[in-house]
Amino acid sequence: MKPTDIGDPAYFHKVVDCQWACPAHTPVPEYIRMIAAGRYSDAYMVNWESNVFPGILGRTCDRPCEPACRRSRVEDGEQREPVAICRLKRVAADNKDDVNARMPRPPEKKNGKRIACVGAGPASLTVARDLLSIGYNVTIFEQDPFAAGMIRSQIPRFRLPESVIDEEVGYIANLGLDLRLGKRIESLAALLREEFDAVFIGSGAPRGRDLEIPGRQEAAANIHIGIDWLSSVSFGHIESVGKRVIILGGGNTAMDCCRTARRLGGEDVKVIVRSGFEEMKASPWEKEDAMHEGIPILNYLVPKAFVHEAGRLVGMTFEKVEAVRDERGRRKLVPTGEPDQLYPCDDVLVAVGQENAYPWIERDIGLEFGEWDMPKVDPVTFQSTLPQVFFGGDAAFGPKNIIWAVAHGHDAAVSIDKLLNGESLTERPSPLVNLVSQKMGIHEWSYDNDVSLAERFKVPHTDPSISLKNIRIEVELGFDRQTALKEAARCLNCDVQTVFAPRLCIECDACVDICPMDCITFTSNEDETLLRTHLRAPALNLTQDLYVADGLATGRVMVKDEDVCLHCGLCAERCPTGAWDMQKFLMQTTKAGPGCRPVAPARKAA
Amino acid sequence: MTYITKPRLHHPSLTRNEAGYTRRDYEGKISTLCAGCGHDSISAAIIQACWELDIEPHRVAKLSGIGCSSKTPDYFLGASHGFNSVHGRMPSVLTGANLANRDLVYLGVSGDGDSASIGLGQFAHCVRRGVNMTYIVENNGVYGLTKGQFSATADKGSKSKRGVLNSDSAIDLVALALQLGATYVARSFSGDKDQLVPLIKGALAHEGAAFIDVISPCIAFNNHSGSTKSLDYVREHNEAVNRIDFFPSREAIVADYAPGSVTDVPQHDGTILRLRKLHADHDASNHLEAMAYLQKHQALGEIVTGLLYVDPNPEDLHAHLQTVSAPLNTLNAGALSPGKAALDKLNASLR
């Protein structure tokens, strides 16, 4: 196997599982250490820099970081749980001081370039933040009288208080944003005729999918499209719902719908999904929260008809199905043959998906559309076939979530900045990475290397008897500082890397003997497949790299399986020659501004 | 030396042995020896060997004297019996313990200072009595705790860290053990666990006096050029005469080798030691030749390692003394005092 190139910024980045999984590559262990140290404002700013909405995301993020977390692969026993990364982020937001003074100050003198963003959701706001702070003029057009897009319209208040949205949108507005609320863009062609140097479209996936089955028209008065209904609730147009409510769909919108219905007078609220409970798109914790509020989730029921009497919805019939695998291993839903089931209800909320819709983009202006009537967008540069028009967030590739919208926004901002500086969009400098030894003394490291054995702490909730009565009462209360400290201690500090210097190694085996996880092996080199089975402990997780180093006196190689390393630093403590060192990996993603310019040849030191 | 304790977390593939323990269950406290010490590797090898042999930790008594090596029993087998004795006196304490309770597995851990200087006499008598034990000397050629003076096993002509030449002749504990009648004699190297672990397993299963001299480089004081006990020197001059595989029974033997290249040595307890010859002219079953072989190759500047001599039918101290099979510490007053009639009969036989 070829020796590992640790000079490649991606190598150590990949070891930091959470950061690698985060679309915006937030340096998670870095801010968790800050929270442990009580440096909440610093932790907030590290987040703000990467993901723009720490307070919002700390409550609502889809948290791809958590399933990736190494902690869930190393814990003992039945309970193997990741660090509560998302909830720690909220701790930073909840406990920070006034951070206004730490926000960037846009240059006095603007660069004269004007950018238009369509839609004031997370993608556009991210583009605005990145570009405003380096001297661009940014105008956002939003059809609603409020900014923040789906963050405000679709996420219910009991999950996300409005004050948090106002605060975090405010930080961006304060950078000199020209925010045109209630201004709907009816024509892209018209917008392009205005004097903008680039246009970013972050208009989301605004159309909820409908369910065209018998009875839909007749019972229309009591059948609602989930996301439209949620936004009507958010903006106070709807204040009640029937006592018996059925929610169709198994995604996070369905979870928001059912929990909202419970708070607006729904007493018998149930979620009904076509496929199995396990296959539902909703995050496990959102399903848990719904069930915790007494909402049953019924599965393998395919909606057949809305049942109505005298023009009024009275129930729904469903066909019972089961999952069967065909000869090619594909899963199919096959009717069980049981009689259809009738569920009486007063209202139905349809949350079976969202779609993009671009009636306002003319098809003759050079902007090409592809499959499913979606614009053709470059997945790296976010550029459309019109060079000055960019897409991001749900508007680019269909419904995802906030953190993806933020990541798209960062990349689109880089593209816009490069375009308007006459540079190639595809030549994107790799991120800046830094490795710094954390050694403070013979047994002292600048991080807490004593691995906590604590199990994941639960976030306290408001009692349902209170929270179910008022839609504005937040259900999750967030960690208090003491619990946050204990939860933070569960973080393994995966960004503190084990860096090996073969020329210093005397092959004494001290690291091999001390490693609690049997990660390190000195052996003769062979193919990766063979090597993985010949280590001190087999390296069976193929998504995790082997760190291979040659140049040892005996001609063997050092192989470290990164999979379950605790980053406890014992290898480095037991190393007599300093061949192992614990070095903190800090990565700055390439942001719009000087960082995304081509790198000038390094000056030689005198 | 390390301040934090080794985290309890372990690799997901860690398995339990027949006794129900994982390898980690055989560990002890965290080592306070210098970073990189060969002794820690030997501790790891002992842990591995005991786990592989399915030994129940509470059936082991580990005894030691004084010195870096004698600190190590604290760092393995945390659930076993331990006795940290006076300098050089481990052999007599071990002999006494073995006499009192023959049912335990005895593991004596000592160093070159403890066994070749202050305790040389104790070492000699313990071996010649054939006490059923595994006697491991962690041999680094220096007094590490007092900052690296030559010990009695340092080779003549080798150089100290400060550049002083050693003018005294070395005591070769392996030659001594052979000469004194040890029935299982081996030498190994802390940096070669593939060799060391099976040797320890063989020794633990051997029912007689088993002695292993393990060259264990002192990284702090004896790992420089000019030393004959440095990692580099031992690696360069290591001549392994054989490799041994240890099988719990004849049925468990899996690997096949060309005839003539292997010798199977059945042990008393039904276990099988399989010797894979690396040096064709070495015969581990011949006491006289083993001694001659050792002398000859030592003169060539080679460090001969492997299982140098094994007697498949050893006799231990209890056999010599014809003690009862029950451990003496379990005998009650009735068994120990047979009464006046028995005494009268004995007296009569002596008249």
Image: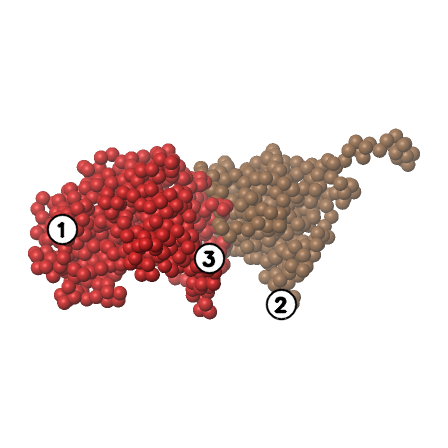
Chain B color in figure: brown
Residue at horizontal 10 percent and vertical 59 percent from the top = A190
For mark 1, name the chain.
A
Disc 3 versus disc 2: distance between alpha carbons? 34 Å
Q: Residue furthest front?
A: A310
For mark 2, name the chain.
B
Disc 3 versus disc 1: distance between alpha carbons? 55 Å
For mark 3, name the chain.
A
Local crowd size for mark 2, using a 10 Å CA cut-off: few (<14), some (14–19), many (≥20)? few
State the residue in front, A131 or A261: A261
Disc 2 versus disc 1: distance between alpha carbons? 88 Å
Chain A color in figure: red
Image spot of residue B311 (x, y percent): 70, 53
A484 horizontally vs A123: left or right: right
Residue B77 image label = none
Residue at horizontal 39 percent and vertical 62 percent from the top = A2
Q: Amino acid at mark 1?
A: Lys
Look at the numbered disc 2 and give the secondary structure of its residue: loop
Verify CB contact (< 8 Å) between mark 3 and mark 2.
no
A99 horizontally vs A333: left or right: left
Residue at horizontal 38 percent and vertical 60 percent from the top = A304
Q: Amino acid at mark 3?
A: Leu
Q: Which residue in the structure is indicated by mark 1?
A: A183
Local crowd size for mark 1, using a 10 Å CA cut-off: few (<14), some (14–19), many (≥20)? some
Image spot of residue A562 (x, y percent): 41, 52
Residue A540 image label = 3
Residue at horizontal 14 percent and vertical 59 percent from the top = A188
Residue B258 image label = 2
Look at the numbered disc 3 and give the secondary structure of its residue: loop
| Of the two numbered discs 3 and 1 in the rendering, the one whose residue sits closer to the viewer | 1
B139 horizontally vs A71: left or right: right
